[in-house]
Image (spheres, rainbow, N blue to C red):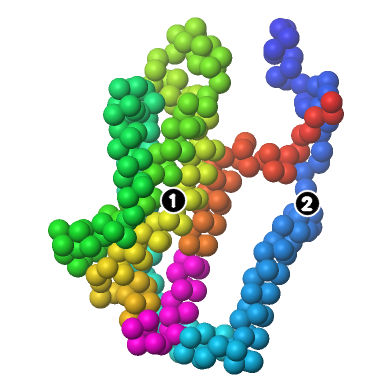
């Protein structure tokens, strides 16, 4: 038996310098989750407390800052109306996000494998990212009309850059020795990509996806600001024009909730698809050096 085979067959506790810890139980995981979440929850409650104090003490006029109760009444009293427009914005966000991921990953792969394409395309991507999307959104409405297409396109443009940059970083972060080893063993470029480059790039990609999915919500709403007759951007714009601040705040809260839910879903997908990476956060193996 070779040394590498003996190390592979050995349990982590039997390897020098490595100690194995038992996997955390349900109670320990619950305690850890509570420890990680109580601070943001406390901060959120503090913000709502300040909001309630400002409204109750009438430090600001109600038409400028509505009370939490008035906003909650809108959320509960006009649920069907808000849900109808929330679904539109969510659909635009998801479709724009999926398109941005597909195009971004493909562009990143091409750029990594072709230096000519990277030198040509990268400055254009940077220029497109710097241009404010709110400034070019009216052009999309003029070119494509008031339908759903301009909103999806803006969501794609905003979400595309984090995806392609994170994917390029991940593909380039592969250990060169691994690439040399695969070449020495006769692996084809496709096999090297599937077995080494792509799996190694996934942690970086998911970091970009978390940013992109929240930006996609912003892109969809920005498109609705410019020209739409449905969606949360339309709701917020109409409420602002009518000085209906409870509806405006309700729309902002729902929009924020969409972003948070989509972010959590991407994080859950990361843990399910990359257990080897997520396990670093609560690893059952630790070094003893």
Quick check: 288 above or below 155?
A: above
Left or right? Give the position of 45 relative to 131.
right
User: What stretch of residues is rendered in magenta?
Assistant: 239-258
Q: Position of residue 76 (x, y in %)?
A: 49, 86
Identify the residue at image location x=81%, y=41%: 22
Q: Can residue 92 be seen in the rendering of this structure?
A: no
Disc 2, SS: loop
Image quadrant in which the N terminus is located: top right
Q: Position of residue 120 (x, y in %)?
A: 29, 29
Q: Which residue is mark 1?
A: 212
Identify the residue at image location x=20%, y=66%: 147
Q: Name the foreground residue: 61 vs 46.
A: 61
Image quadrant in which the C terminus is located: top right
Q: Which mark is residue 142?
A: none
Q: Position of residue 169 (x, y in %)?
A: 48, 32
Quarter of the image where one finds residue 220: bottom left
Identify the residue at image location x=83%, y=20%: 16
Q: Which residue is mark 2?
A: 25
Quarter of the image where one finds residue 119: top left
Left or right? Give the position of 10 relative to 178.
right
């Amino acid at each position: 038996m070779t040394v590498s085979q003996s190390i592979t067959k050995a349990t982590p506790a039997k390897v020098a310098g490595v100690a194995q810890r038992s996997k955390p139980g349900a109670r320990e995981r619950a305690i850890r989750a509570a420890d990680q979440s109580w601070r943001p929850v406390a901060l959120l409650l503090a913000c709502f407390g300040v909001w309630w104090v400002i409204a109750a003490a009438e430090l600001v006029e109600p038409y400028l800052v509505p009370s939490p109760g008035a906003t909650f009444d809108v959320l509960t009293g006009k649920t069907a109306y808000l849900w109808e427009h929330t679904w539109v914005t969510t659909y635009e966000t998801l479709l724009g996000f999926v398109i941005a991921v597909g195009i971004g990953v493909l562009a990143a792969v091409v750029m990594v494998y072709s230096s000519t394409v990277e030198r040509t395309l990268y400055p254009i991507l940077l220029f497109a990212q710097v241009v404010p999307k709110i400034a070019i959104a009216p052009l999309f409405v003029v070119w494509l009309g008031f339908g759903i297409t301009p909103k999806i396109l803006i969501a794609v443009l905003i979400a595309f850059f984090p995806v392609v940059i994170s994917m390029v970083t991940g593909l380039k972060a592969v250990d060169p020795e691994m690439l040399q080893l695969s070449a020495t063993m006769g692996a084809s470029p496709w096999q090297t990509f599937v077995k080494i480059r792509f799996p190694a790039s996934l942690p970086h990609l998911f970091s970009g996806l978390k940013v992109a999915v929240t930006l996609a919500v912003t892109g969809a709403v920005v498109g609705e600001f410019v020209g739409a007759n449905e969606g949360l951007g339309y709701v917020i714009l109409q409420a602002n024009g009518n000085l209906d601040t409870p509806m405006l705040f309700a729309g902002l809260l729902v929009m924020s909730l969409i972003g948070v839910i989509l972010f959590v879903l991407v994080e859950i997908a990361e843990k399910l698809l990359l257990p080897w990476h997520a396990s670093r956060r609560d690893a059952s193996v630790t070094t003893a050096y």
